[in-house]
Image (cartoon, coloured by chain):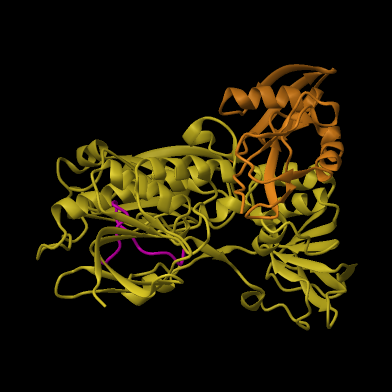
């Protein structure tokens, strides 16, 4: 079996993969292939039938499938090849040529390998499962992740249950609280372990408040009743140590428990290839070009870090696509394909949990670089500060910052060089993002 | 008598915290919004709240048993369940295309129900 060659292989045909492909084609990459494991392009957007997508990108409010359709149309107009029902099973690099070996399979061709000049990782993320949450009790039917329930209702047209309790206030959980209510189910309560919601504020308003669904913060599920099918769950208040407080237990009868307790980037393939992963995000560690430690391998979208807004995913993915094009033009196949060591390392502290990217090569840095991050707690009336070495780059007053909402700072290349006095020296090789008092 | 109300804008996922100064039933000032949509939302939310409704409609002969739909414009908040009841009765024949009008003037409102996804005939 001979390996097929392909300049750029994109793993995943969701919002990230589509936008990356489109941008790479615009930047001159002729030979592209998108590999998608589902029956249709569009990824998770196909089941996100609610509105609120695209305000940044298209200046109008679209539903998930409509937003996806815009990008699918573009990819088709650009004549970019894609393979559906195709699962990538292994990813490795050929040490001699630097090519990436993408092993995939589908019903028509069986197992095959694509020899890629560059790869964009766009596999998205997965929901945290019951197993990862350690909820005690039997394993009856009726326990679903919120996204699985969303697939049942919106794609398959089936209802998972009639009386629902939701654990976790992530956006999918909030959206499903409304969706199940509209379809005739009774959503009794949403319990959230943390003292704040993990979802967007707008979703609390329009998905819970609009339908009088109570949100219980600092509460968790301590027991699930039922052997064959869920019969009810017990919810208890938790203290500051997040441990249940005895005596606060309350029983809710229900036939369905939905879990919306966070998303985890899906990086099994990245790990096989030896991509360095961040212990904070679970996604690859990347530089200003969204390139991983493996030259020619880029990452974007929820596989990199979990986003709230698909508009930001599309923007980020376009950057990855353009940089993959530059790599193919300038570095692929050359002995010095690896970049020099980064000029600037980005450090986050005082509640800033991580940043994407985490390093900057000045030579490859665009005039404007968007650095995105999340904070670890709710911060009110604080100042978001950026320093290059000891010197201040920016100070931004913030009314509220919360873990559920991604934050960003935009770095200007000219400003960094001006602060450092023309070139980055040892005194200016660390960029710190931090939260300070007013 | 002026009264101050705090709202969370639902126009987009940013969710601006909006402060509205009311004088009786009249809006005196709106602040905290990052765009004009927030101003319009706040004024409307306190006088005549409305929502875009999204759901699914049954499809026969298509590649999936349902297709997603939305109200092409917002409908009064108190009409949400009426809208849902009406579209739950609808059954379409594949193919269905994005933008196809599924129900016009749903539940006596000015809004049409339109398809938001493709459902191919199989």
Q: Is the magenta stretch mostly helix, strand or loop?
A: loop
Residue A390 vs A305, above or below: the answer is: above
Q: Which of A255 and A341 is in front in this view?
A: A255
Judge whether A244 appears above or below B112 on screen: below
Q: Given the current orientation, which residue lies at the most extreme left position?
A: A335
Which percent across, then down, holds residue A353? 47, 59
Residue A31 lies left or right of residue A88; in this view the side is left
User: Where the C terminus of chain B falls, by quadrant?
Assistant: bottom right
- Residue B47 location in percent, x, y? 81, 23
| Chain letter of the yellow region | A
Up-down: is A323 above or below A115? Answer: above
Quarter of the image containing the N terminus of chain B? top right
Q: Is residue A290 magenta?
A: yes
Point out residue A320 in the picture as x, y percentages from the top left corner.
33, 51
Between A142 and B30, the residue placed more toward the observer is: A142
Q: Which residue is drawn at 35% across and 63% down?
A: A285
Q: Give the range drawn in magenta.
A: A280-294
Left of A183 or right of it: where is A353?
A: left
A285 lies left or right of A236: left
Q: In which quarter of the image is residue A93?
A: bottom left
A185 in magenta: no
| Chain letter for the orange part | B
């Amino acid at each position: 079996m001979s390996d097929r060659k392909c300049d750029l292989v994109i793993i995943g045909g969701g919002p990230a993969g589509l936008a990356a492909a489109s941008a790479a084609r615009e930047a001159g990459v002729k030979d592209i292939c998108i590999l998608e494991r589902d029956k249709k392009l569009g990824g998770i957007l196909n089941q996100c039938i609610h509105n609120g997508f695209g305000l940044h990108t298209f200046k109008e409010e679209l539903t998930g499938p409509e937003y996806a359709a815009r990008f699918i149309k573009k990819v088709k107009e650009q004549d970019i090849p894609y393979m559906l029902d195709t699962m990538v099973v292994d990813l490795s690099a050929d040490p001699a040529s630097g090519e990436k070996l993408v092993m995939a399979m589908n019903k028509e061709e069986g197992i095959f390998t694509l020899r890629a000049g560059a790869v964009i990782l766009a596999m998205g993320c997965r929901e945290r499962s019951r197993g990862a949450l350690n909820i005690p009790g039997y394993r009856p039917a009726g326990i679903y992740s919120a996204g699985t329930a969303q697939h049942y209702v919106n794609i398959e047209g089936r209802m998972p249950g009639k009386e629902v309790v939701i654990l976790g206030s992530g956006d999918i959980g909030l959206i499903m609280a409304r969706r199940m209510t509209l379809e005739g189910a009774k959503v009794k309560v949403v319990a959230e372990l943390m003292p704040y919601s993990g979802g967007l504020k707008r979703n609390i308003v329009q998905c819970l408040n609009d339908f009088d669904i109570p949100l219980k913060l600092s509460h968790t599920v301590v027991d699930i009743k039922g052997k064959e099918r869920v019969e009810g769950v017990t919810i208890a208040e938790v203290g500051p140590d997040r441990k249940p407080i005895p005596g606060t237990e309350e029983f809710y009868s229900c036939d369905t428990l939905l879990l919306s307790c966070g998303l985890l980037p899906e990086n099994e393939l990245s790990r096989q290839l030896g991509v360095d992963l961040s212990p904070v995000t679970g996604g690859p560690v990347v530089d200003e070009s969204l390139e991983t430690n493996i030259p020619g391998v880029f990452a974007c979208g929820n596989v990199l870090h979990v986003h709230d807004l698909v508009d930001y995913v599309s923007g980020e993915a376009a950057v990855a696509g353009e940089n993959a094009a530059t790599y193919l033009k300038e570095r692929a196949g050359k002995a010095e394909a690896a970049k020099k060591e980064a000029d600037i390392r980005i450090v986050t502290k005082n509640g800033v949990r991580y940043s994407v990217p985490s390093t900057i090569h000045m030579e490859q840095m665009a005039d404007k670089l968007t650095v995105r991050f999340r904070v670890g707690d709710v911060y009110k009336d604080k100042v978001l500060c950026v320093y290059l070495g000891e010197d201040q780059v920016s100070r931004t007053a913030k009314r509220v910052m919360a873990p559920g909402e991604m934050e960003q700072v935009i770095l200007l290349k000219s400003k960094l060089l001006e602060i450092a006095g023309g070139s980055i020296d040892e005194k200016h090789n660390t960029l710190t993002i931090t939260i300070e008092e007013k | 008598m002026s009264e101050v109300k705090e709202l969370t804008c639902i126009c987009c996922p940013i969710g601006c915290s909006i402060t509205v100064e009311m004088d009786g039933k009249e809006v005196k000032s709106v602040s905290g919004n990052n765009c004009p949509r927030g101003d319009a939302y706040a004024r409307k939310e306190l006088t005549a709240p409305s929502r875009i409704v999204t759901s699914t409609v049954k499809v026969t002969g298509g590649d999936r048993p349902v297709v997603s739909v939305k109200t092409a414009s917002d409908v009064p908040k108190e009409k949400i369940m009426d809208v849902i009841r009406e579209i739950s009765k609808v059954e379409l024949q594949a193919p269905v295309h994005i933008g196809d009008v599924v129900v016009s003037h749903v539940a006596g409102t000015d809004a049409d129900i339109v398809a938001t996804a493709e459902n191919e005939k199989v």
